[in-house]
Image (cartoon, rainbow, N blue to C red):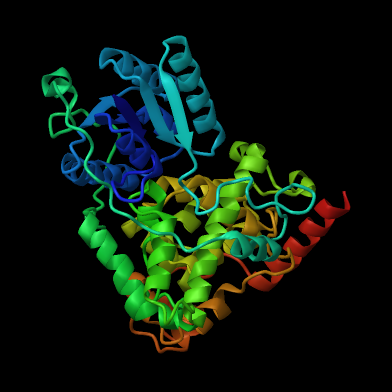
Amino acid sequence: MKLIWLRRDLRAVDNTALNYAINSGEPVIAVFVATPTQWQKHHMAPMQADFIYRRLFELQRELEVLNIPLLYREVGNYTQASQTVVDLAQQLNVDEVVVNRDYEINELARDLSARTLCGQSDINWSEFDDKCILAPRSVINKQGEHFKVFTPFKRAWLSQVTIPQIVSAKPAARHANPKQYAKELWGDQCVFSFTRISSEHWAVDFDSIRGQLRQFCRDRVENYQQERDFPARESTSSLSPYLAIGALSARQCMARLYAESYSGVLSEGAQTWLSELVWREFYQHLIVFRPDLCKSKDFVVWGSQLEWWDNPAAFERWKLGQTGFPIVDAAMRQLNQTGWMHNRLRMVVASFLTKDLHIDWRLGERYFMQMLVDGDYAANNGGWQWCASTGCDGQPYFRIFNPTSQGERFDPQGTFIRHWVPELASLSNQLIHTPWKSPAVNSLSYPAPMVDHKVEREITLRLYKEAKDN
């Protein structure tokens, strides 16, 4: 009998480890182990915890069709999780534990511990690369190292990749003794103690998830390249939460993208969206080559020389969306209320925190993880270090977003701002980006800009130049 330990791969379709277990011809049991103490240390968002919780009920139904029961246990941390999985395997007389690999440093240590314990108990351990379309270490430069720049990585990635074929899983062999695990089954009676905030905006059933992917690839990806930077428009896929918990695979995304293309030729919009998937792979691969990134280290050597300002009051205003810069505040309020933020705005608010407020990118990275329903360590870390100019192929440090012009350019009618900053709704399309210029500024109940962008820009240029010179 096979035991598949599910983690960030909460799907029954296109699941490499699950397919391996089913194809063995033996009965298969699935288990999910909640680790609330570990999740707290990793700053998991309560909304993502709720998303996982809700997804488990749908996954249970999907696995039941395949004759696979979903068991559940809760322990504190990864060390305990490794032990409880091996204990369960022994209890059920399992001959093999199968998993899909995670690449973060704590997760690697967890699996090493579990693999060792399995070996001591004469239980086989099999693990698979499933999170990426192309596995880490398979896309390397001529020196056998990870690419330091995205464009050549993407070029090499495209030269190696083939269009994935998605095949539905067949049912596994039936269990001879279901009573053996009846008390371990996932259900309403199970204790899921991690704090949860409603994620009801996000569907969790397979048909809805697949339908959202198909609808985007069929109806919206064509204009993705032109429309993706405008937060008031429904132009992005909003599939990142599903990729983050593995309810959807990157292979499914790529396969559907080509299935909806014209004779297998991707439109400009489709190529741009594929590039976003490749960026995701770039950052996943990166933490394998540079595990110190999982310990909040800067990618660039001179990053440790940067002078960050200790300003808790300013950080709090940034978090609350009370900076006095409308597009920044609208974005932060969207994050706080929905657990999600438009990608263009993630760059804007990250640039503002690091280059207008001079606050350490790590604080912003952590806050995002505490709030995001689509929180993924590699993607979040990569994005923050890109914006802070300390990352692998990060933006040049002298590229500093002007928060006012970003709003004017990507929310020209002020539609997004009006939705999330209703105290500015009465202003004209022009003044909504610069409310401090309004004759009615004193009646707006909105703060004045907390900094002068031009002044802070010059300070940033000095701080970064000093760090690099040192």
Residue closest to the eye, 255 or 409: 255
**Outermost residue toward the right?**
469
Residue 84 location, quadrant? top left
Left or right of 305? Residue 131 is left
* Residue 349 visible: no
Where residue 168 sits: x, y (%)? 28, 53
* Residue 157 visible: yes
Residue closest to the eye, 85 or 34: 85
**Outermost residue toward the front?**
25
Where residue 385 sits: x, y (%)? 63, 53
Residue at x 51% of width, y 45% of height: 377
Q: Is residue 16 above or below residue 347?
A: above
Where residue 169 sits: x, y (%)? 28, 47
Where residue 16 sits: x, y (%)? 40, 43
Q: Is residue 142 above or below residue 108?
A: below
Residue at x 24% of width, y 29% of height: 27
